[in-house]
Image (cartoon, helix red, strand yellow):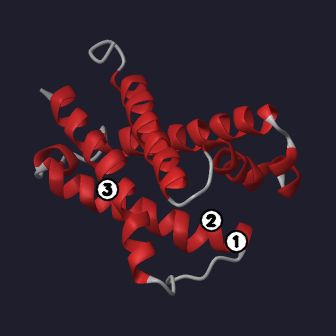
């Protein structure tokens, strides 16, 4: 599948790595995977999605993969037009892309929808939130793109 459609493979890989990270983080913090998915669904569907039961879980998962689809599509769109992304070291371009995604999500999207402060007050939580953007989205995308480019 990776050779036939690298963007589809990247979308499934990055989306799965990121949602598993979010689920584990939620459980470690004392929450549930379901409440995390409901929170994701509440982004586009409003706070009422938090009470949707299994429908909220499905909506949250669909929302997550839709957002990841946009992240992956943006990467592949730029990577196929800007040779530097495949010429530079994958870990560097992946880190830069992860930082960009972090800023878009935490500096624009979350403040507009939920009123989250940016920059965050708690820098430890900020670092924890930065981790999956770089390691589970940026790095795999950059690495897969280099493999695809050869």
Element marked by disc 2: helix
- Residue 54, percent across and down? 78, 32
Q: Which residue is mark 2?
A: 109
- Residue 22, percent across and down? 50, 49
Mark 1, other Cα within 10 Å: few <14 / some 14–19 / many ≥20: few
* Mark carried by residue 80: none
Quarter of the image with the N terminus is: top left
* Mark carried by residue 112: 1
* Mark carried by residue 134: 3
Nearer to us of marks 2 and 3 is 3
Element marked by disc 3: helix
Nearer to us of marks 1 and 3 is 3
| Left or right placement of residue 117 versus residue 7 in this view | right
Mark 3, other Cα within 10 Å: few <14 / some 14–19 / many ≥20: many
- Residue 52, percent across and down? 85, 41
Q: Based on the displayed image, in which of its 4 quarters is residue 128 positioned?
A: bottom left
Q: Nearer the viewer, residue 32 or 42?
A: 32
Q: Earlier in the sequence, mark 2 or mark 3?
A: 2
Disc 1/disc 2 C-alpha distance (Å): 5 Å
């Amino acid at each position: 599948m990776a050779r036939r459609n690298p963007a589809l493979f990247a979308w499934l890989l990055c989306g799965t790595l990121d949602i598993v990270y979010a689920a584990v983080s939620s459980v470690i913090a004392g929450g549930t995977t379901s409440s995390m998915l409901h929170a994701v669904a509440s982004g586009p569907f409003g706070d009422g999605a938090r009470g949707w039961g299994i429908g909220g879980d499905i909506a949250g998962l669909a929302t997550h993969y839709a957002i990841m689809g946009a992240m992956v599509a943006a990467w592949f769109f730029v990577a196929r037009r800007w040779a530097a992304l495949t010429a530079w070291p994958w870990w560097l371009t992946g880190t830069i892309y992860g930082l960009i995604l972090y800023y878009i999500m935490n500096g624009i999207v979350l403040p507009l929808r939920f009123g989250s402060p940016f920059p965050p007050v708690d820098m430890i939580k900020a670092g924890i939130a930065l981790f999956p953007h770089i390691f589970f989205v940026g790095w795999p995308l950059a690495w897969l793109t280099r493999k695809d480019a050869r």
